[in-house]
Amino acid sequence: MAGTFWLRDNRLKKIYIDPFLINFSDSADFILLTHEHFDHCDKDSIRKLQNKNTEIIGTFGCIKNLSGHTNSLVAGESIRYRDGIKIEAVEAYNINETYYPKGFGVGFLIIMDNVTIYHAGDTDFIPEMPKNMDIALLPIGGKYTMDVNEAAAVRTIELGIAVPMHYNSERFGYGI
């Protein structure tokens, strides 16, 4: 449905991306937020995952109303942490729609344990899409994101594993 993912590295660091409708409490090391829409920047879910040391990274539109350790990133900026985790914001936007204009949201490249994971955020297949990642988490909702055929074209950018997100989400009322 939505773009929520949970990652863990070999040191058991927990990264949540766009937590939405989380119905449990956990202790996240990192929370990444791609843009400020309700299904990607759910304040109730963030509170359930946040502790005093949680690093929250996202667009300014997401983090401006959050407290704790927050960092805003725009495409092209990155943060490297002492534990070896690197988080880089990358472009995410619509080419022929105005719903996600360039600069509104981001995707993320997360590098941990020598693995590069790309969370595309809500985006079309765009020229700036990163190349040579191990895992790509790709939106295939088809309305304001790639459709299945566009997501399949991502195979041309040399990736290992592609994982869909936002598939059929309109059916559940989360189609933005």
Image: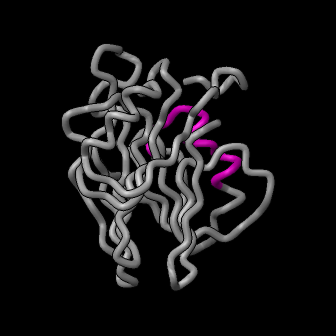
Give the magenta range. Answer: 34-46
Whole-percent x, y for residue 73 in the image = 32, 52
145 or 25: which is nearer to us? 145
Question: Is 97 a magenta residue?
Answer: no
Residue shown at the point (56%, 42%) measured from the top left:
3
Residue 31 vs residue 89: left or right?
right
Whole-percent x, y for residue 169 in the image = 64, 28
**Above or below, 93 relative to 80:** above
Whole-percent x, y for residue 59 in the image = 39, 45
**Above or below, 106 relative to 53:** above
Tally the numbered discs: 0
Quadrant containing the C terminus in the rendered view:
top right
Q: How is the image coloured?
A: one colour
Q: Main secondary structure of the magenta part?
A: loop
Residue shown at the point (34%, 57%) measured from the top left:
109
Residue shown at the point (28%, 21%) measured from the top left:
95
Q: Report which quarter residue 71 is drawn in.
A: bottom left
176 or 145: which is nearer to us? 145
Residue shown at the point (47%, 43%) measured from the top left:
62
Quadrant containing the N terminus in the rendered view:
top right
Residue 162 vs residue 101: left or right?
right
**Above or below, 102 relative to 23:** above
156 or 31: which is nearer to us? 156
Q: Report which quarter residue 98 is drawn in.
A: top left
Question: Is 45 a magenta residue?
Answer: yes
Whole-percent x, y for residue 20 in the image = 66, 44
